[in-house]
Image (tube, rainbow, N blue to C red):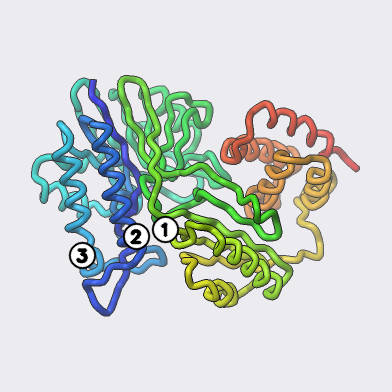
Amino acid sequence: MARIAVLSDAHLLMQAKRFPDESDKSPGGKESLINFTRVVDQVLKDRPDVVIMAGDMFDEKEKGGDWVVDAEAAKYWPDIRNEVRRLIDGTKHGVYSLRGNHDSAPVLLELQDYFRDGFYFARNEAKAIEDHKIYFMETHYRHGNYVIADEQLPQGSEILVMHETLPVGPIPGLQEEVLQELGRRFDLVLNGHMHFYGSGLLGMSNLYSLPALIPSRELKNNYMLEYRWPGNLDDPRQKDSPFGYVIIEGSGVSFRRYTPVQTIVNVRVEGEGPEEVIAGINEVYSRLMERPDKENLRIWVSAKGVTFKHTVREGAEKYPEIETIEILVEPKRVSKKPAELKGLDKVMSIADLKEKVLTTLSGPDNELAQALFEEVLTDQYLSKRMDSNQTRYLFRELLSRAAPLYGVPEERLGRFFATIESLWKIR
Ligand SMILES: [Mn+2]
């Protein structure tokens, strides 16, 4: 029985940037190579017989739409190829790679050519590895809700490796019925792209979401530490390390954690205006300065209450020891009228519901509800034409899907529904 290591979403070339001196690598790019080397060491210690890459391992362009031209990417390739070579040499059957939505087929074909034997770009085909038959389904990635036509759905293999958006968070993705069908056709469904490790998703015991191998700019909602201002800065929220890979042996799938060289911190600051936001940045950053690992922190800031990024940037630059990777700003919308949904307004406005829910619940339930109202149940995601029953249904659906992401157990969710159910009723 073969032992299979499944790696996904390293986004190795994402940090490639243009520099006047073309031999320069970006700090983020260098760091990704250090992480890649370390995680390859770790994978080899697990003694896999074969390595599967489930997409977006290499990445073809940097965020923002600038294509990484050959000169930028070329200087990373000797190191990347070196590590891929170690994976090939260290395993009986080499490396099989799927194409993710950020991968470029020519890059994967070139690697296949370069290694001749040992690296295989598998696209919409089954590969036999010892006694396993594994199907590699090339990504259908699209925005929003999408389907794969029935006749295009693979079958006849035991393991499916794919790279699709799973509809498990606030963002829609591949239609659930399609996933259920794939779950019936395969013993094991392994999906990249989502950047988090999860099993038993959508009620499918054989569906696994693969973690990102190492940190990249493509962090999505995964990070390790979260500081919120205003809030309790002594007790930042710790999210479980999202990085690593999985090992498959027989019917068992196990997650192997990888601890990267840097610590990813998400700083969320909210104020009524620039002064307040800057005050928040100062408070959080002085707290970060007290951390013994301050040199290894990589900060992502999201600031609500300012319009210009440079306002926050200037605040953060007063702490040169702390490395800020990215700043997102969002003006605080003060809506004169609470957001009302047609039909629902006869029952209750979202603002009223929010207030009632938040004053009724405490502790983790309250936190969950806050997150839900801030990130999920916003009018950005809800159609204004939706009637109240649909809204209630959607609310329940979204909550059920969001709850595992916030670590809320099922029985608590049941109690939560029971509590809020009466709040929907007419005032
Ligand atoms: Mn992807």
Q: Position of residue 33 (x, y in %)?
A: 28, 56
In this figure, which residue is indicated by the disc labeled 2? 14
**On the image, numbered disc 3 is attached to which residue?**
75
Please say whether residue 426 is visible from this viewpoint: yes
Label 1 with label 3: CB-CB less than 8 Å? no
Most foreground residue, 289 or 184: 289
The residue under the point 17% across, 58% down is 78
Q: Is residue 314 above or below residue 82?
A: below
Given the current orientation, which residue lies at the most extreme bottom position?
20
The residue tagged with tag 1: helix, strand or loop? Answer: loop
Q: Please name the residue shown 75% across and 66% down the image.
A: 334
Tell me the kind of residue under disc 3: Lys
Q: Quadrant of the N terminus?
A: top left
Task: Report the residue marked by disc 1.
Answer: 217
Q: Earlier in the sequence, mark 1 or mark 3?
A: 3
Residue drawn at 30 percent across, 49 percent down: 57
Horizontal and vertical percent position of residue 98: 27, 42
Q: Which residue is nearer to you in this view: 77 or 230?
A: 230
For disc 1, the neighbor class at 10 Å (few under 14, some 14 to 19, many from 20) is some
- Image x and y of residue 149, in percent: 39, 36
Q: Amino acid at mark 1?
A: Arg
Q: CA distance from mark 1 to mark 3?
A: 19 Å
Ranked by sequence position, the earlier of labels 3 and 2 is 2
Give amino acid for label 2: Met
